[in-house]
Amino acid sequence: MRRSKFKNSLSGKQRRLSEAHEIELLDSWIEVMKPDSGTNPLSIPPPPPTAPVGRILGGGFSPYAGCKLFRQLPISQKTKDGLAPKYTEMSEIQRASLPHSLCGRDILGAAKTGSGKTLAFIIPVIETLYRARWGPEDGVGSIIISPTKELAGQLFEELKTVGKHHSLSAGLLIGGRKDVDEEKQRVNSLNILVCTPGRLLQHMDETPNFECSQLQVLVLDEADRILDAGFKMEVDAIISQLPKQRQTLLFSATQTKSVKDLARLSLKDPEYISVHAESVTATPERLKQIAMIVPLDQKLNMLWSFIKANLHSKILVFLSSCKEVKFVYEAFKKLRPGIPLKCLHGRMKQNVRMAIYLEFCEKTSVLFSTDVASRGLDFPGVDWVVQVDCPEDIPAYIHRVGRTARFTSEGKSVLFLLPSEKEMFTKLQAVEPKIPIQLKKPKTEKLQPISELLSSLLVKYPDMQHLAKRAFVTYLKSIHLQRDRDVFDVSKLPIEEFAASLGLPMTPKIRFISQKQTKQKASVETIHEQENGTKVVNREMQSIDRSNMEIEDDVLLPKETSLIDAEGNKPADLSTRVLKKKKLKINVHRPLGTRVKYDEEGNVIPPLAALADMDSGDGALHPDKVKERYAKLREEMKERDKEDKILHRERLRDRRTKEKIKRKRWREGEEEVDKEDGGSESDDTEKGKHKRSKIYFDSDNDDDEKKGKENVGVSADSVSIAEQEALALKLLSSMHS
Ligand code: ADP
Ligand code: MG
């Protein structure tokens, strides 16, 4: 961003004088032409030519109502030069918000996906610091926070373009980069930080003398996402370290309405700018949206057929988990559809992630992705957004489809819904403003079934079988963990057909356990008092309620331990579809304490008769034998007690390790808790080392992360199901970033 234009033609002194003069003019222009608070220049007429400037006319007016070009705004020549020639005319959100943000007001801006919100905050950031004559010694003047690394990278690029003639310095601080130490040395001299919450917090915690007490402008892009529960800890900690006297700009296509959220940010009389409030649709007008009912076991056939029918289109495919993305990508790649395929998810190394992102910007191809690509990313020319797995809610839907039909371009989207997820369609149709989505019948005659092909692939490549199993399990888990119970119901899914459709020869083991019962432990001991006062210890395996399920947790559990049963034994093999059916059920209704025993002839003997002295003929209990038996039972109980204690200690240790890893992750600055890695920003690194404006901190601490990940593994027995679920929920919700 080092300025160049003035430097060539003017001496340093002249330049400073001319800058001072320009800033003076801009300041007075802004002061005199302040639009009335609460006015939207889009919806009110410009003042009549005779009206005194700055006066309120009736319902108020905006001197900027007629302004459609960037050059009509009170912004510096350098910014205008940075905007031209690409940007001349303003988009609606820019026209509506810039007059307010340029005079220092807080903004809560909502505008459809692809409508140009980025410039609506980048311009005031640059202008405010320029007019304040911000220099290297002034430290951090503005912080721009993005929920994902790719989006942060994209914002940083836009900032570099628009600010290229300014002498402000900016840095991209995102997780997973090498040389945090180098970053720490430089971060204090940067004026604008573009970052993900975790990495920013890491600097706040660890960088000596990290200073942001002079912060002028805080920006939250995708504000509703940044303010949601997934980032709560980081964002609260960040905000507590920022000065209250500052300008705050919040932008998103689906804006937060929570007063609590806004209170957290202590906004001062924010301007609520919603350019699509009057619009009939919540999604871009040029976007054609359809939904189709596709049974779970037909999804891959449908996706394959869709890709084969659109070989010349740029297609973005959303799936719900990294594992699914990996499997579908690898499998389809081997089946060679005739169009380049790519995949993007949080478990990839950061440098690979960035490379894929850039490649998909350039080339016609199919990109399989998790929700990591659902927000903010501006891939040019996406023809189709295909949602193979149902989005978690309506905002998620809006952001996913928003990857196409951006700015003035057209786009199409298709949503696959399971028969049991039809309620999502009803919900989408019911929202205001509307989402114009139509239900279409899939053309089943054009369907190309690929399950057979997948089966043979899995035979040929054993690794693929593992991927398929993982995909199967994580998909079911993601459905199980969804909050919207009207839409998502794992018990309605044709699980065996689904496994077969992935080419799996057998259904991977999934365990259904009711939460209530898991809390009680699967193995239950009771001391049952008989009428005669004799105490009998019973140790019975409880039968398992299948109404709810606990799924083998591949994110939390290492492969070796994930299949440990309630008794701590490892089953010999994954159960097959056949085995599953054969599995014996234990009758829960059988009264406790009535363990049936047989004598050598196979006759049933009454409880405790085994202890009776048969020789005495009256069946009475022999006191010595009873004593002996109780002594034995006591020993057994003591033994079990010891085991329990060891187990408890292990549990505590695991929990501590988990907490430690969690804390470490947060510090690592990731938008996704479940990713293993970080990485480097490839090409700009070298350049960045020499130019302040292009500092690209290169790093790759994925090794550490991986080590951490391995430790995450906890055995099924050592953590309660509630804890596992809470953690899994966290992992999944952050996966949906
Ligand atoms: P949003 O954040 O609202 O989803 P972006 O800021 O990513 O949208 O902008 C979407 C696209 O529109 C980008 O490619 C951007 O370069 C382009 N764009 C934004 N504003 C303008 C403008 N005023 N004139 C031309 N193109 C613009
Ligand atoms: Mg955006």
Image (spheres, rainbow, N blue to C red):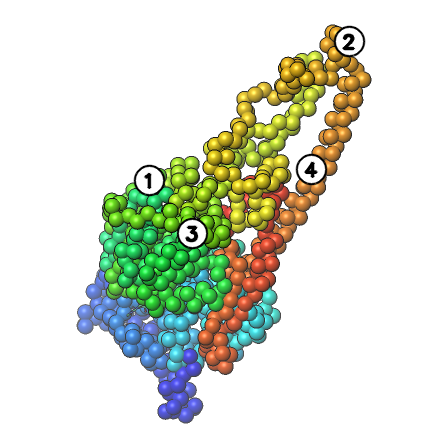
Mark pair 2, 4: CA separation: 40 Å
Could you tell which of marks 4 and 3 lies nearer the N-terminus? 3
Whole-number angstrom distance, CA of label 2 to CA of label 3: 70 Å
Pointer 1: what residue?
A: 419
Quarter of the view holding residue 20: bottom left
Can you say whether 709 is above or below 187 in the image? above
Quick one: label 2 or label 1, which is nearer the N terminus? Answer: 1
- The residue located at (48%, 65%) in the rendering is 350
Which quadrant holds the C terminus? bottom left
> What residue did someone put label 4 on?
644
The residue at 50%/35% (across/down) is 579
Residue behind mark 2: 616
Q: Give the camera-side residue of 188 and 211.
A: 188
Cα separation, mark 1 vs mark 3, equals 28 Å
The answer to which of marks 2 and 3 sits earlier in the sequence is 3
Q: Secondary structure at mark 2?
A: helix
Please state which of the two labelled residues, at mark 2 or mark 1, is closer to the viewer.
2
What is the spatial separation of the Cα atoms under label 4 and label 3, in whole angstroms?
45 Å
Does residue 546 appear to the left or right of 274 in the view shown?
A: right
Q: Nearer the viewer, mark 4 or mark 3?
A: 3
Mark 3 = which residue?
457
Q: Looking at the image, tell me whether mark 1 or mark 3 is earlier in sequence order.
A: 1
Image location (x, y in percent) of residue 687: 47, 79
